[in-house]
Amino acid sequence: MFLRNKNKSVYYLVSMPIEKRADLKLIQKRLNENKLSFGSEDALFEKLKITTGAVSALNIIGVETTDVVFVMDKVALECEKVGFHPNVNTATILFEPAGIEKIMDRFGADLRFVDLNEEFRKI
């Protein structure tokens, strides 16, 4: 999900397991934000050079710099493999969690693992 804070000063790209339902109030709480809402398609293109439907942690590849904060559910660290779209939503690439950390580090991304697991409801 591509989210922004109330005054549009911070943008977040949140990744979580597909079987979980997002609770924006919980995400706000975990990120110490007062109000989060979805970022606009224009902001998404400006910040990550992608369009709606292709949001992924791999969006860091192909942009020189970005101030988007990449947030991943901490449960990803417990997984053998995690999957991400490679800037299009017609394919998925699998990584070991350490691999995605290396990619994010290589491109200077602000990556945060946040505990979104406990209070999410399964669909």
Image: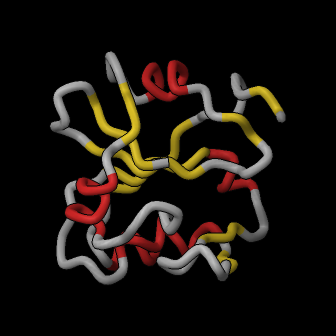
Task: Determine whether 33 is above or below 17 in the image.
Answer: above
- Residue 94 percent location from the top left of the image: 69, 78
- Residue 47 percent location from the top left of the image: 23, 62
Q: Is residue 82 left or right of residue 34?
A: right
Q: Which colour scheme is used?
A: secondary structure
Residue under the point 63% across and 48% down: 16
- Residue 29 percent location from the top left of the image: 45, 19
- Depth check: give the residue in front, 45 or 61: 45
Residue under the point 58% across and 70% down: 98
Q: Is residue 120 left or right of residue 57?
A: right
Residue under the point 69% across and 47% down: 75
Q: Quadrant of residue 118?
A: top right
Q: Where is the C terminus found, in terms of image quarters?
A: top right
Residue under the point 32% across and 16% down: 34
Q: How many marks?
A: 0
Task: Determine whether 99 is above or below 11 in the image.
Answer: below
- Residue 82 percent location from the top left of the image: 69, 67
